[in-house]
Image: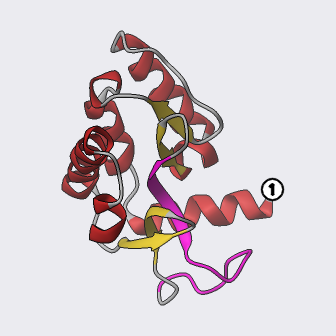
Amino acid sequence: MEEYLAGLPRERREAISRVRSVILDRLPDGYAEEMRWGMISYEVPLSIQPDTYNGKPLMYAALASQKRHMAVYLSGVYADAEARADFERAYRASGKRFDMGKSCVRFRRFDDLPVDVIGDAIARYPIEEFVAVYHRGRRG
């Protein structure tokens, strides 16, 4: 993590570090912070959920510096229509520019991100509930 952060330009390092702090403050117990896929990932350890579609830990959230933007990935928002609707409503109510794909919330500066809304999305799923959402999605 420290090597990843040290390799970022100062402004991005500060923004990513601040968002990371919000995530760590709100992250329910049991998730593991790891470097995976070139980003900081918050995962369900294989010891809790060993049967995954790709044999890797389930990603709950992630934080990355991309070429043109920074991003927070929110798998709970992606996997649950109600969570997505709640998230989008709260995000738009913040007055911040809404720039989101399926799970990827893009931002260019820390101040562009409604961190309280991100924090609420992170806090939404204790690990057991997220694993249940994953299984519901796999069953179709």
Residue 93 image point, x, y percent: 37, 12
What number of labels is visible? 1
Q: What residue is pinned by disc 1?
A: 140
User: Where residue 39 appears, x then y in whole percent?
Assistant: 47, 61
Nearer-the-camera pick, 100 or 39: 39
Magenta residues, as a range?
A: 48-65
Residue 62 x %, y %: 46, 55
Could you tell me the amino acid type at mark 1?
Answer: Gly
**Residue at 24%, 50% in the rendered image:** 17
Residue 34 position, x and y percent, is 40, 73
Q: Looking at the image, which is closer to me, 138 or 17? A: 17
Q: Quadrant of the C terminus?
A: bottom right
Residue 5 position (above or below residue 49): above
Q: Where's the N terminus, which quadrant?
A: bottom left
At a point 68% along the width and 83% down the height, the residue shown is 55
Residue appearing at x 24%, y 58% in the figure:
24
Q: Quadrant of residue 15?
A: top left
Instruction: Give the quadrant of residue 126.
Output: bottom left
Pick the residue in front: 40 or 93: 40
Q: Is residue 29 above or below residue 66?
A: below
